[in-house]
Image (cartoon, rainbow, N blue to C red):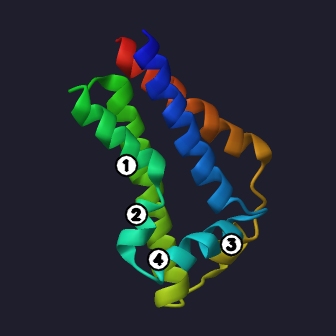
Amino acid sequence: MESIYTVVLISVVAEIFEIIWQYAPNIAGILANNYRFYSKSIILFLAMHTGYIYTIFVSLWFDILNTPMIAIIALKIFDIFTKLEFIQKIYIKQEIDVVTATLLNKRVPLWLYILQFALYPWLLYEALVW
């Protein structure tokens, strides 16, 4: 049981790291923080998503692929691909339509960061005890 708590605690640390480097008051700032690493290397961009890498590691190490684990992996893949699509659209192709411009100026509420901090470790715990 102690090992489960250790695994979940490491997940919490990985999520805190992601929150810290991505934090910005609006979506444009979050995408700018992501583009900073993407412009250096796509591998660096993916490596900065420590929660995703750690989840894949835990899934393979403990041979777990149940519903909570699939939910974590699916949400994280969706998150990364969405960021990649916006980076391609805004910074590479420089195609900003009215809807995208409106979205970029939207403020990111604090509860969304707290949700990331709470949801993924909780789902990981559920996957481990399932």
Instruction: Determine whether 6 is above or below 112 in the image.
Output: above
The disc at residue 28 is 3
Q: Position of residue 49 (x, y in %)?
A: 46, 56
Q: Looking at the image, can residue 121 be seen?
A: yes
Residue 29, quarter of the rendered image = bottom right
Residue under circle 4?
38
Q: Residues within 10 Å of mark 3 (few under 14, many from 20)?
A: many
Question: Of label 1 and label 4, which has the lower sequence position?
Answer: 4
The disc at residue 53 is 1
Q: Is residue 2 left or right of residue 30?
A: left
Q: Residues within 10 Å of mark 2 (few under 14, many from 20)?
A: some
Question: Of label 3 and label 2, which has the lower sequence position?
Answer: 3
Residue under circle 2?
46
Q: Position of residue 8 (x, y in %)?
A: 49, 26
Q: Amino acid at mark 1?
A: Ile
Question: Of label 1 and label 3, which has the lower sequence position?
Answer: 3
Question: Of label 2 and label 4, which has the lower sequence position?
Answer: 4
The residue nearer to you, when weighing 81 against 123, is 123
Q: Is residue 106 left or right of residue 48?
A: right
Instruction: Determine whether 86 is above or below 109 in the image.
Output: below
